[in-house]
């Protein structure tokens, strides 16, 4: 039989472990959450404006449609309430890709992040101001083109994850949301990605 002091120590250890686990879970959620959600409705329409990456975009649509609870399909023109891929030469000061989610209500559009620097605007959230559209800008400038061409499937799935609200993880994680600069990239949605999307939508 435990003494009262031994019982107190056991309770203290259990409480400490529970508190540490709570911190770890909280950190994990925060690290992978941009703080907004996409409002998909019945079907997420994904369009491709004259890019060189039709195959990679097609794989992205199929993976999100089959591997998650979202219904995702392609559409031949960009829709206000959908996701649109477009390519431009945006110069050396722009990353190889940037995903900007947006919210349009009654002909008024607000953006979840700034195109110039990717900083969140605070205009979108997880409840009352969900995104309902987005554009993924692909930079075909020569400074980043080699990486984009060689890792197109990863880039498309990664940027689409941003539209759905997923943030970067770290290089040790098995996820399409690993940031640039890692040594290993994933061309298919991983368990972490699927679980995150399915817990949100």
Image (cartoon, grey):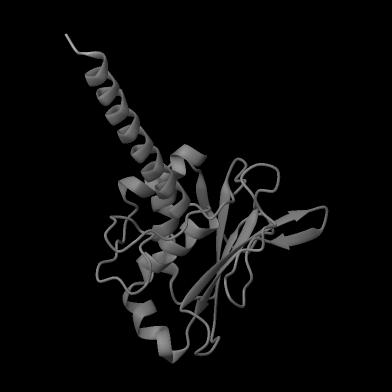
Residue 32 can be seen, yes or no:
no
Q: Pick out the residue farthest to the top.
A: 1
Q: Pick out the residue farthest to the left.
A: 1
Q: For the N terminus, which image quadrant?
A: top left
> x, y percentage for residue 132?
65, 52
Q: Which residue corresponds to the image point at 62% horizontal and 73% vertical from the top-left? A: 115
> x, y percentage for residue 183?
25, 71
Residue 182 can be seen, yes or no:
yes
Q: Which residue corresponds to the image point at 25% horizontal and 19% vertical from the top-left? A: 5
Q: Nearer the viewer, residue 185 or 75?
A: 185
Q: Quadrant of residue 16?
A: top left
Q: Which residue corresponds to the image point at 47% horizontal and 84% vertical from the top-left? A: 140
> x, y percentage for residue 187?
31, 61
Count of labels in the image? 0
Q: Nearer the viewer, residue 21 or 54?
A: 21
Q: Is residue 48 above or below residue 41?
A: below
Q: Quadrant of residue 90?
A: bottom right
Relative placement, left or right, of 127 versus 106 is left
Q: Is residue 153 above or below residue 1?
A: below
């Amino acid at each position: 039989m435990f003494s009262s002091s031994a019982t107190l120590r056991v309770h203290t250890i259990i409480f400490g472990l529970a508190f540490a686990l709570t911190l770890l879970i909280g950190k994990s959620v925060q690290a992978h959450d941009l703080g907004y959600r996409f409002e998909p409705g019945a079907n997420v329409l994904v369009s491709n404006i004259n890019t060189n990456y039709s195959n990679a975009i097609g794989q992205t649509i199929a993976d999100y449609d089959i591997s998650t609870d979202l219904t995702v399909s392609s559409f031949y023109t960009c829709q206000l309430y959908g996701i649109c891929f477009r390519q431009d030469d945006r110069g050396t000061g722009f990353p190889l890709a940037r995903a900007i989610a947006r919210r349009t209500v009654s002909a008024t559009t607000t953006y979840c992040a700034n195109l110039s620097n990717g900083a969140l605007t605070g205009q979108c959230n997880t409840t009352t101001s969900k995104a309902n559209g987005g554009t993924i800008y692909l930079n075909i400038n020569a400074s980043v083109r080699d990486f984009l061409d060689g890792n197109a499937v990863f880039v498309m799935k990664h940027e689409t994850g941003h539209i759905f609200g997923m943030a970067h993880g770290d290089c040790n994680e098995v996820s399409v949301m690993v940031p640039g600069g890692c040594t290993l990239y994933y061309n298919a949605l991983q368990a972490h990605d699927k679980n995150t999307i399915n817990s949100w939508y």
